[in-house]
Image (cartoon, coloured by chain):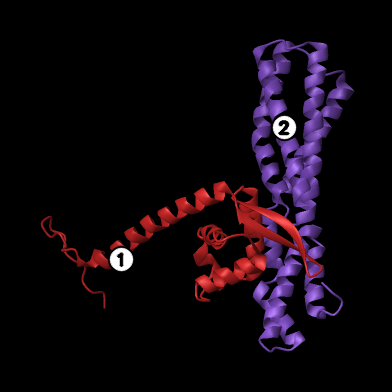
Amino acid sequence: MPESEPRLIRGYLEVLAAQLPGPIVEELADGLTETHRSYLSRGLSADAAAEAAVAEFGSAEEILAGFARVNPARRTARRLLGFGPVVGGCWVAALATSRSWPGPLPTRVALGLALVSCIGLLAVAALDRRYRVAFYSGVAGCVGFAALDASLIVGVLVVAGVASWVTAVAMAFSSARIALCARAAAAAQQNT
Amino acid sequence: MRAEELKGHLDALLLATLEGGPRHGYAVIEALRQSTGGRLDLPTGTIYPALRRLEQAGLIAGTWSVVGGRRRREYQLTPAGVRALSGRRAAWRDFSAIVTSALENAGLETPNLENGACPSPNPA
């Protein structure tokens, strides 16, 4: 929005820009500018038109809440959290039956901590109403889970191979999760 | 009409505004206002998340252009959006016919008194 636009509209857009990605704010700025112009054409002063435009647009909180609900990171995080116990259960069964637990104790502890961190990041993405926080937590959680899945698949293949059908199922689920993470990353790139 | 009364129908209304061709957010709002005679009391900023949701669902597709030095996002129906609009129109016609019939004719039925039931007395 140009410098000549009323301070009220600039301040309103700054509040939104602090939370939302640039392209979304640009789209909102375009709509707000058109709304402002519409009121100017009806004979209102610049400040009165700005007040009317902002009032018509709704509060910044309403708009932020609306975008929080459609945040793609939120949806992906909820899917991954729902899908997680199934994949985790399969891996526990696969590793228990093949008796090929990944590496020495410190490696297992590190994997466990990484898993807990990824779950925490996805929980933030699924629940936090701040768009940017949810978005970046979701991206980090997705990258983490994809890396964990890839490590598990490669590690098990190197150590024991596909020892049983349970291992094959666990690998298939992990591959599906990697694909979901990759698709979500591509969609996230489109939305920012 | 307030936003909460529109719940569940906003998507169909937005799809309908795009039936005539691509529109940007403000034009969608104006079209919605004109088609409803200005009776929708929606904070217009809430239309934009709804457009994003429809885009994520693959029902509309957005493209950027530059107008007057500003970036503008225009939306148009996808083939899936055209099918969804058609389905929602048909569902709305059915729903509307059923509710209209119930609201206008329910009180005209003769009460069945054979099993001893009787109309409740006027509490006043």
Q: Amino acid at mark 1?
A: Leu
Q: Is residue B94 left or right of residue A161?
A: left
Which residue is drawn at the image coordinates 83% and 33% (left, top)?
A113
Q: Amino acid at mark 2?
A: Ala
How far across and down, in percent of the image, does residue A13 sit?
Answer: 79, 69
The picture's colour for chain A is purple
Q: Classify 10 Å Cα crowding around label 2: few (below 14), some (14-19), many (20 and above).
A: few
Q: Quadrant of residue A78?
A: top right
Q: Chain of mark 1?
A: B
The residue that label 2 is drawn on is A179
The residue that label 1 is drawn on is B103
Which residue is drawn at the image coordinates 73% and 44% (left, top)?
A187
Q: Is residue B22 visible?
A: yes
Residue closest to the eye, A24 or B70 = B70
Residue closest to the eye, B65 or A137 = B65
Label 2 or label 1, whichever lies nearer to me, is 2
**A166 vs B84: above or below:** above
Q: Quadrant of residue B75?
A: bottom right
Q: Chain of mark 2?
A: A
Quadrant (top left/top right/bottom left/bottom right) for the N terminus of chain A: bottom right
How far across and down, in percent of the image, does residue A105 sit?
Answer: 86, 21
The picture's colour for chain B is red
How far across and down, in percent of the image, does residue A70 sit?
Answer: 67, 53
**A153 vs A65: above or below:** above
